[in-house]
Image (cartoon, grey):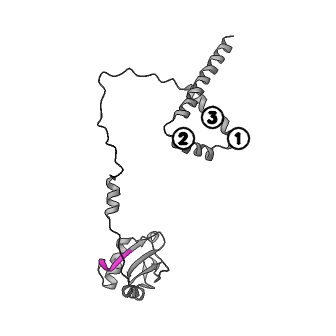
Amino acid sequence: MDKETNVLSEEERLSVRIEEILAKINSDPNPEELEKLKKIIKKKVPFTRRSYFAAMLLKMLASQPERRERAPREKKREFPKKEAVKETEKPEKEINKEAKPEKVLPEDAKTLYLNIGKMKHLYGKDLSKLLQSELSITREDIYSLRVHDKYSFITMSEENCVKAIEKLNGREINGRTAQLNFSNR
């Protein structure tokens, strides 16, 4: 009889926990977070195992000792409250992004495709130095450099692009033969 009483009390305790969880679900101030968790469970737990998954979660929750409220401390530490950001005010990061002027390319700007990128240890700084030394140009003559994993894009004046193709096409750069041509972009 003790086992039955113990089982019933265990079942009652679990029923109370289930009711608490359901109440928390209904009153949760952040349902988006629950939705994210639900999607993760949907992705990771097979449909036929979800009820077992829920049962195991409940079992794990029941095996944890119940949290007791702490006695209030004598002196509560107060932290300064963060001021709410007004809609008209923007965080500093956003302000810096907006303050950055967009680079306007001149009309004669052309983009070159180079078949070498980061995987061959070619980085923007190296490419810029190479172009400056080989073409006798300054840093300002290179409008933009975009170095990707396997290729790069160089934007300069059409005159400098033609010079780059003449001087660098077929040349070995970091163990790879460079192929430069006008980009379709």
The residue that appears at 64% across and 43% down in the rendered structure is 45
Q: Nearer the viewer, residue 172 or 42?
A: 42
Name the spot of residue 139 as percent of width and height, x first: 30, 77
- The residue where tag 1 is placed is 48
Question: Which range is magenta?
Answer: 140-144
The residue that appears at 64% across and 21% down in the rendered structure is 11
Q: Is residue 56 above or below residue 174?
A: above
Give the Cα distance between marks 2 and 3.
Answer: 14 Å
Q: Amino acid at mark 1?
A: Thr
Which of pointers 1 and 2 lies earlier in the amino acid sequence? 2
Label 2 CA crowd tier, 10 Å (few <14, some 14–19, many 20+):
few
- The residue where tag 2 is placed is 34
With 149 as the anchor, is 21 left or right in this view? right
Give the Cα distance between marks 1 and 2.
Answer: 21 Å
Residue 167's quadrant in the figure?
bottom left
Name the spot of residue 20 as percent of width and height, x first: 56, 27
Of the residues tagged 1 and 2, which is closer to the observer? 2
Residue 22's quadrant in the figure?
top right
Label 3 CA crowd tier, 10 Å (few <14, some 14–19, many 20+):
few
